[in-house]
Amino acid sequence: MYSVVIKNASIIDGTGSQPRHGDIAIEGEQIVRIADSIDTAGQTVIDAQGLVVCPGFIDVQNHSDSYWQLFDNPSLDSLRAQGFTTIVVGHCGASLAPLLSRESLSAMQKWHSLEGANVNWSSFSEFIETLQMSELGCNVASLVGYSTLRRGLVGGNANALQTQESKTLLAFLEQSLAQGAFGLSNGLGYGHELSVTPIELKDFVEAVAKTKGLFSVHLRNEDENIIESLDEVLELAKDTGVKLKISHLKLSGGQDKHVLEHVIDRLETARHQGVDVWFDVYPYDTVWQNITRYLPSWIRIGGRNHILSELKDPTKRKKVIEHLHNTNSTLPELLVVSTANKLNVIGKRLSHIAKDFEITSEEALLLLIEHGGTEIMVFDQTLDSKTVESLVMHPFSLVATDGAGFPNPQGVTSGVVNDRLVHPRCFGTAPKFLADVRDTNAISLSEAIRKLTSTAAQVVGITDRGELAVGKKADIVIFNPSTIVDTATLTSPYRFPRGIEHVLINGQLTVKSGITLKTLSGQVLRKRQT
C-alpha cells in the first residue's frame, strides 16, 4: 500500500512535455511510481479526474523573511493556497543571516518594523537550525543579502570597502555558501547599496559562481536609466560566469515600447554571449514598495537616518520637493498601505492626506517619511499591462510573487488586516498567471508550468524538486484549469484563489479541496555542494 495514490490525472510533469493521462504513487516524501494505471491501494486516494496534476510551484522571489512572516505566520497560508510549495528568500540585498552585528538586520526595516523581534542566531547555519524548529507551510531556501553583510560590518557607511573589510565579508559569504545558502542578492536600488560598484562586488560574485550559486539583483534603476542599470549587472555576470537573475523586472515611469525592445535585446544578446541570465516578473500592473524609493538618490544614500537629517535643511528639503514634483506625475495617486508607527492613513491616497493637512502631495510624502517610521509601504499603479504581459510570457522569465505568506483571516469583510494592506500577489500570483495563459493562449499550459517548476528549480539550484518524476520529492499541485483564478484585489487582498484543489508538500496533503489544512510539512533547504 502506498501513502498516497493520485488517480485519473492529466499529468504535466514540469519539463515542458505535453500532458499525459495516468496515476501517481507516493511513499513517504517521494514519488515512487508514475504509470497509466496503478491498482495498488493508497492510504489516501485522490481522484484527479478533469484536473491537472503538476509539480509544486517554486517562488524564486519571496519576501516572507523581510515581512517577518516566517515567524509571525510560518504556515504561509496565502502561498501554499495558490500552489507554492517552495519559496526562496533573502532577496534585494536583505537576508536574515549571517548577522555580523545588530546593524545587520537594519536592511529588513524598509519592509517591516523589527520592534520586539526575537533573534537568537548569528551564522547562516544557526538561522537554518532556528527555522527547522518551526512548523513551516512551505519549503524555504535562502540567499545571503549583500546589504545584510555590509551593514553588519560597516553600518551606514556608504564609502567603498577597505581591503580588510572586503576580505572579512567575503569570508562570511563563503562560510554561508558552505552552510547551504543558495547564492547572493543585491538591492542596488536601495539607499545602502546605491554607492556599491561592480568593482566592489566582483570578488563576492566570483565566490558565488564557484559554487554554481545564484546572483539575484534588484537593478539600480528601473526608470529612465534601466538600460544602463541592466548593462551594469550583465557585464558583471559575463566577467564572473555567475548565474544571474534580475529581480522583479519592470519598466517603471511609463517608458514606451522601444525601451522594452532595448531591454529584451540586451538580455537576448547577453544569452548569445554565454551569460546565464533570467528574470522574474509578477503579473500585476501595480508596484508595492517603500515610499522612500521616490526620493532622489543623493538623499537615499546612507538610509533613513541620513534622509531625516538632510530633510531638516530647508534648502535641501526644497530641492527634494522640486525633484518629486518634476519626476513623479502619479505621486498624488499613491495608496498608503502600511506604516511602522500605525498612522491613521492606511488605505488613503497621498492626495487625500495632502488635502487633510492642506499641503501638497510632495510635502505629504515627506511628512509620512518623517513620522511613519522605517516601514512606509505604498501601492503605485504605474506599470503598463501589455509590457507586463510581454515580460511574463518571455522565455527567460520566471513567475514570482515578490510578496510573502499571509493568513486568510476568517470572516474578513474589509481589506485592512492588522493595520495593513498587502499586495494581491501574495494571494494570487500563480492562479492569475495560469488564468492569463488560459485566456490568452500566449504560451502553452505546459510551458507555463515549466516556468513555475523545473526552470525555477534549475535557476535556484534545487535538484530534488520541480518535476514529477520517480525519486523526486512529492511536492504536487492539483488544479482545475477551467476555473483557476485569483480573487484578491488591491483593496481586498486577503482572499484565496479558486481552482487550486489540492496541494501536497513532501508527500503530505496540506491543501484539500481548496482549504488550507493544519498540516505543515515544509522543510528548510540547503544547497547541495558541487
Image (cartoon, grey):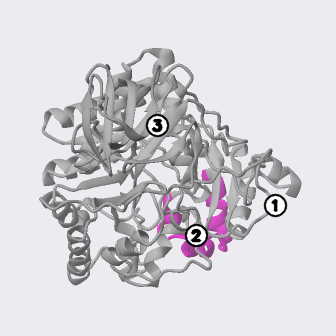
**Residue denoted by label 3:** 251
Position of residue 147 relative to residue 269, above or below, is below
Numbered disc 3: secondary structure: loop
**Residue denoted by label 1:** 344
Q: Is residue 311 magenta?
A: yes
User: Would residue 313 appear left or right of 172 to someone viewing this image?
Assistant: right
**Residue type, numbered disc 1:** Asn
Which of labels 2 and 3 is toward the front? 3
Distance Cα–Cα, label 1 vs label 3 = 31 Å
Which of labels 1 and 2 is toward the front? 1
The percent coordinates of residue 209 (x first, y second) are: 16, 57
Mark 2 vs 3: CB contact within 8 A = no
**Residue type, numbered disc 3:** Leu
The residues colored magenta run: 297-323
Q: Is residue 251 magenta?
A: no
What residue lies at 66% left-to-right and 48% top-to-bottom? Answer: 325
Distance Cα–Cα, label 1 vs label 2 = 23 Å
Q: In the rendered structure, which disc, 1 or 2, sits on the residue that comes first in sequence? A: 2
What residue lies at 88% left-to-right and 54% top-to-bottom? Answer: 356
- Total of numbered circles in the picture? 3
Quick one: label 1, few (<14), some, or many (20+) residues within 10 Å? Answer: few
Distance Cα–Cα, label 2 vs label 3 = 26 Å
**Which of the two residues, 364 or 38, is positioned nearer the viewer here?**
38
